[in-house]
């Protein structure tokens, strides 16, 4: 991969420079702002222009993204986007683009295989009915599993650049705190109580009214499975705690950067500002802010303001001048001219407000990139490259 020379943050002015200087790019933002598409577009651009092996890791099961990358489907196993897909899009890639989608259940199974102290414990956990039922539904486990998978792939050295599309979450802090939460869980009083000697605990549980009812309804096997599950899980605690520390270190590594994606609507901007402050508090590197669906800059040109105001104020007079050429009644032409002028002035107000928001968001990151409105949805690799081209330089 073509690497930018190492220098201070002031040397980085474009996303091309940022991605060539980093090994991990984490795309964050609230739902519906285009962070998955942005991550895929930047991965495609890096594979096309920087070379090396590039992986886009997403937790978004959107079939549209697989189609855009020219894949029938993809899952936990990394899948290569064929070079012919780039050729069909009119680009000869310098490197390789790969894609994978997080499979929470499979990733938990892989963790158990990795951290179980022996074969017997591993098989007992995987066969435990409680584990089988909840491993795909651990509350907020997407956040931790995404970070865990990122750490595993990065340390394998298989890729020069990994672009991660983070889990959709209403509170982006959950993502940053996921490794620490996992470590805290293994040292929590709840787990110590659950992993107390099984016989004593089952007897204690069975003495309480709720568990007496549970035992009558679900059978003693239910309580025994719970006891066995948490007992077996506790044997993996040292490995999980050590791993959580390593995953946390990955976030603050100098080769890692964050990309905050947002539109300039009030709610996404508020969440983007909140997340940027969280990155600053944790001293994590904010490489770029990407603003989607931004109005064009010509709307802010004051030279056009006078024209728009004339269209509104002198619509009748102007309509009388051009009405004959348009073969339309002057009053109808005047209505159109007035609407055009008023629409321009309204959009100008919005564009000016967007510029103020952009300036506010640009205080911290190395790069602020904007993406205009596209007339059609992005449905293929050519569309991703077109979006990426708007962001790249």
Image (cartoon, rainbow, N blue to C red):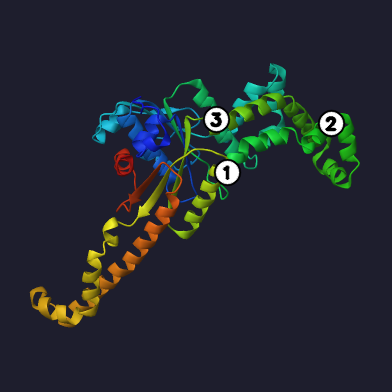
Q: On residue 99, which mark appears? A: none
The quadrant of the picture occupied by the N terminus is top left
Confirm whether residue 183 shows in the render: yes
Residue at the spot of label 1: 281
The local crowd at label 2, few if under 14, some if 14 to 19, many if 20 or more residues have their Cα within 10 Å, is some
Determine whether 244 is above or below 207 in the image.
Answer: above
Residue at the spot of label 3: 250
Q: Is residue 367 left or right of residue 235?
A: left
**Pointer 2 with pointer 3, Cβ within 8 A:** no
Confirm whether residue 71 shows in the render: no
Nearer the N terminus, badge 3 or badge 1?
3
Q: Is residue 299 left or right of residue 232?
A: left
Determine whether 122 is above or below 140 in the image.
Answer: above
The image quadrant that residue 17 belongs to is: top left
Q: CA distance from mark 2 to mark 1?
A: 38 Å
Helix, strand or loop under label 1: helix
Considering depth in this image, is 247 or 221 the residue closer to the camera?
Answer: 247
**Pointer 3 with pointer 1, Cβ within 8 A:** no
Residue at the spot of label 2: 196
* Residue 86 position in % (x across, y down): 29, 32
- Rendered residue at 29%/56% (across/down): 297
The image quadrant that residue 151 belongs to is: top right
Considering depth in this image, is 115 or 260 the residue closer to the camera?
Answer: 260
- Rendered residue at 35%/66% (across/down): 349
Helix, strand or loop under label 3: helix
- Which label sits in the foreground, 2 or 1? 1
Considering depth in this image, is 248 or 333 the residue closer to the camera?
Answer: 248
């Amino acid at each position: 991969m073509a690497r930018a020379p190492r220098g201070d943050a002031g040397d980085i002015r474009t996303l091309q420079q940022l991605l060539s200087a980093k090994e991990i790019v984490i795309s964050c933002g609230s739902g519906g702002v285009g962070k998955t598409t942005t991550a895929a577009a930047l991965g495609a651009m890096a594979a096309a222009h920087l070379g090396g092996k590039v992986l886009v890791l997403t937790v978004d099961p959107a079939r549209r993204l697989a189609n855009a990358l020219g894949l029938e489907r993809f899952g936990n196993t990394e899948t290569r986007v064929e070079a012919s897909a780039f050729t069909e899009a009119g680009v000869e890639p310098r490197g390789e683009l790969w894609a994978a989608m997080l499979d929470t259940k499979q990733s938990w199974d892989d963790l158990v295989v990795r951290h179980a102290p022996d074969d017997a414990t591993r098989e007992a956990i995987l066969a435990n009915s409680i584990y089988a039922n909840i491993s795909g539904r651990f509350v907020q486990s997407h956040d931790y599993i995404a970070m865990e998978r990122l750490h595993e792939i990065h340390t394998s050295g298989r890729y020069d650049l990994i672009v991660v599309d983070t889990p959709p979450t209403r509170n982006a802090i959950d993502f940053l705190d996921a490794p620490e939460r996992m470590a805290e869980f293994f040292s929590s009083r709840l787990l110590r109580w659950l992993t107390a000697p099984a016989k004593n605990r089952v007897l204690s549980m069975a003495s309480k009214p709720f568990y007496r009812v549970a035992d009558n309804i679900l059978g003693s096997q239910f309580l025994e499975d719970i006891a066995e599950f948490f007992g077996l899980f506790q044997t993996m605690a040292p490995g999980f705690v050590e791993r959580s520390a390593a995953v946390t270190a990955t976030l603050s590594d100098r080769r890692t950067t964050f990309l905050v994606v947002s539109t300039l609507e009030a709610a996404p901007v508020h969440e983007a500002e909140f997340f940027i402050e969280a990155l600053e508090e944790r001293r994590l590197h904010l490489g770029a802010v990407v603003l989607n669906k931004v109005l064009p800059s010509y709307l802010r040109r004051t030279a056009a303001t006078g024209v728009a105001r004339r269209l509104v104020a002198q619509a009748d007079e102007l309509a009388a001048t051009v009405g004959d050429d348009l073969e339309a009644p002057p009053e109808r032409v005047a209505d159109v001219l007035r609407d055009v002028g008023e629409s321009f002035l309204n959009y100008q107000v919005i564009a000016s407000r967007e510029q103020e928001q952009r300036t506010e968001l640009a205080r911290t990151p190395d790069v602020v990139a904007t993406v205009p409105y596209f007339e059609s949805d992005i449905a293929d690799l050519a569309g991703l490259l077109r979006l990426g081209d708007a962001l790249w330089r």
